[in-house]
Amino acid sequence: MASDTLTSSARTDAEITGLDALEIAGRDKEVSRGTRLWAATWPKLAALAIAIAAWQLVVLSGWKPPYSLPGPLEVGRELMAQAQSPQLWDGLVTTLRRAAVGYVFSVAVGLLLGLAVARSTVLRAAIGSMITALQTMPSIAWFPLAILLFELSEKAIFFVVVLGAAPSIANGVISGVDYVPPLLLRAGRNLGARGLNLYRYVIAPAALPAIVAGLKQGWAFSWRSLMAGELLVVGISQTSLGAQLTYSRELSDAPWLLSTMIVILVVGLVVDAAFGAADKAIRRRWGVLDQAGQ
């Protein structure tokens, strides 16, 4: 009887070797949602604490007078005061509206242009390098032309935002399509995918990671272009975040200026988190995300 028990135990151990053992090991590493949330949050909180401590140390060093570089507590009080007034929220709505309109239009232009260039050798030879050249142009360099064309208006800001974002998105699409394995294209055609169906079911899913990266980079360019535009084209809006930065500088109101900069930074962090969540969802769908580390 004892020998039968040992034999059964040995058989059980043998049955959980190989891939089964790897699956069990991966299951053992699974952690709760709260643990994963904390693991993703504490580095950000630590970085924030270090930044605030460094800021306070610079203030205490006396490098700049308090009216020029106020401390975190003073700026925090100003930020709370601004949050209780409609001025900040009106400016945030105005800026986000401009960002959304410009970015959506940039996405449409970038996707269409990128797909056209990626699949046409003639277009690639004609304007492929031009797209990269446009991407490298500083956004601020477009504003003199934009003001000449559209004067000090919303159209001038829109013009610069689109020129800042669309080339980055187009380049992301081109890179994604270029790295689609030819085997997938042949398999798709053999299964009957032609024309738009080939793009919908084969090329777009395969190129999606690079496209998302291009969309993220395009947002960064559009956001920077928008901030530059609002700083320069102040007269058309009294409430935008860029206008508030300009007014606070002209009034030498450092707490107001720094609190507005913090709001702009927070918006960028929130959008970056949204793109990060989309990227994680894509990697999970592709099976390249460690389930234990999600």
Image: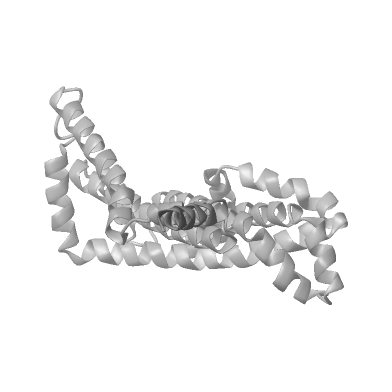
Left or right placement of residue 52 versus residue 157 in this view? left
- Point out residue 155 in the picture as x, y percentages from the top left corner: 52, 64
Residue sitting at x 39%, y 64%: 96
Instruction: Tell me residue 19's x, y (percent).
Output: 56, 54
Residue lying farthest to the front in this orientation: 1
Residue 122's x, y, as percent?
87, 56
- Residue plotted at (85% across, 50% down): 125
Q: Is residue 71 visible?
A: yes
Using the rendered view, name the quadrant where residue 251 is placed.
Answer: top left
In the rendered structure, the answer to whether residue 277 lies left or right of residue 120 reads left
Instruction: Tell me what residue is drawn at x 45 percent, y 48 percent.
Output: 228
Residue 68, given in percent of the width and then of the height, sits at 20, 33
The front one of 69 and 267 is 267
Task: Tell me, yes or no, if residue 148 can be seen here.
Answer: no
Residue drawn at x 43%, y 60% is 274
Q: How many marks?
A: 0
Q: Coloring scheme of the render? A: one colour
Quarter holding the C terminus is bottom left
Relative to 102, does residue 140 appear above or below in the rendering? above
Q: In the rendered view, does 144 fall on the left or right side of 93? A: right
Report the quarter where the N terminus lies: bottom left
